[in-house]
């Protein structure tokens, strides 16, 4: 499993667990460092990718087990977890099953279960990826993830990026997307002991605002909703890093 690191060496660690994507998070290292620069002034930040030798069947539970193993290998305990979308599902499982690794967690546009609507959306992505319809996949992905204004602004860039997606990228995307099938860990959230914050998007077309807030209710934690924002608000809202900083600084 690959990772990159930035911020203050020796400070309390933040582990960023990214969401589902058609490409490795390693290619976005520069933009992530820039986006989360406010956090880097106070914390030691690790961004952990999915495993390289991905098996044909790879569930969210498997992803959580491997991410926890990577944290063990890096010596990260009592870390602050920031899980984005599918990464938020992974973060919840780590906090529930490996509580010594999670000092607190912030959950971005995520849920503790997959609804029928989410399964339909992800299923459309998988079908396009299996048919190698790269441009159509990027169009559907961008339309579903981003707000209409942001999608319109970057649509041509997104569609142009389709040409760089390899068959291996598509195969990994398919495996990870299918890994969410049947995901439901609501019964395990009672085992989470760390402070948590759920940040939702008011117009989340991928996972649904109500399912993010349901997770917050089960955890008994605070929540904040960016009204009118799409699923990818973590990439869009200017104050998102500062909101995370305020939460993480308050807990450690």
Image (tube, grey):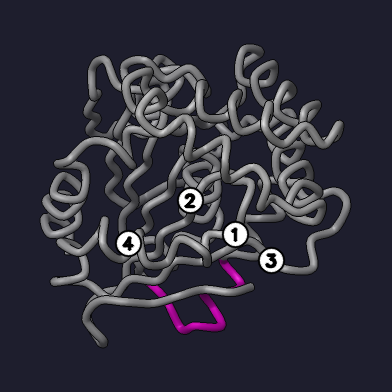
Find the distance from the CA under tag 4 to the CA under tag 3.
21 Å
Mark positioned earlier in the residue sequence (2 or 1): 1
* Quadrant position of the N terminus in the picture: bottom right
Mark positioned earlier in the residue sequence (2 or 4): 4
Circle 3 — which element? loop
Circle 1 — which element? loop
The front one of 63 and 78 is 63
* Image marks 1 and 4: residues in contact by CB distance under 8 Å: no
- Residue drawn 68% across the image and 26% down it: 136
**Left or right: 68 with respect to 250?**
right
Find the distance from the CA under tag 1 to the CA under tag 3.
10 Å
Q: Tell me if residue 50 comes above or below residue 162 in the rendering.
A: below
* Residue at which label 3 appears: 51
* Residue at which label 2 appears: 91
Residue 111: where, in percent of width, then height?
49, 30
Mark positioned earlier in the residue sequence (4 or 3): 3
Count up the numbered dots: 4
* Residue at which label 1 appears: 24
Q: In which quarter of the image is residue 238?
A: top left
Mark positioned earlier in the residue sequence (1 or 4): 1
- Residue drawn 68% across the image and 21% down it: 119
Residue 71: where, in percent of width, then height?
51, 74
Residue 106: where, in percent of width, then height?
32, 46
* Residue at which label 4 appears: 80
Residue 250: where, in percent of width, then height?
11, 55
């Amino acid at each position: 499993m690959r990772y990159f690191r930035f911020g203050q060496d020796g400070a309390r660690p933040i582990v960023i667990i990214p969401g589902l994507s058609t490409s490795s998070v390693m290619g976005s290292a520069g933009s992530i460092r820039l986006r989360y620069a406010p956090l880097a002034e106070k914390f030691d930040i690790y961004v952990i990718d999915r495993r390289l030798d991905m098996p044909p069947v790879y569930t969210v539970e498997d992803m959580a087990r491997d991410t926890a193993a990577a944290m063990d290998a890096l010596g990260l305990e009592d870390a602050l977890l920031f899980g984005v979308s599918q990464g938020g599902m992974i973060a919840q499982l780590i906090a529930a099953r490996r509580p010594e690794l999670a000092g607190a967690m912030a959950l971005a546009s995520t849920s503790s279960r997959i609804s029928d609507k989410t399964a339909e959306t992800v299923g459309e992505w998988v079908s396009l990826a299996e048919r190698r319809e790269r441009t159509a996949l990027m169009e559907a992905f961008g339309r579903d993830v981003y707000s209409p204004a942001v999608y319109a602004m970057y649509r041509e860039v997104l569609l142009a990026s389709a040409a760089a997606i390899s068959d291996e990228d598509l195969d990994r995307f398919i495996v990870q997307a299918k890994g969410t099938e049947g995901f439901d860990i609501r019964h395990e959230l009672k085992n989470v002991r760390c402070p948590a914050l759920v940040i939702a998007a008011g117009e989340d077309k991928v996972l649904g605002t109500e399912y993010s807030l349901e997770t917050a209710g089960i955890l008994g934690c605070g929540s904040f909703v960016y009204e009118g924002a799409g699923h990818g608000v973590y990439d869009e809202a200017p104050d998102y890093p500062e909101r995370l900083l305020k939460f993480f600084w308050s807990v450690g």
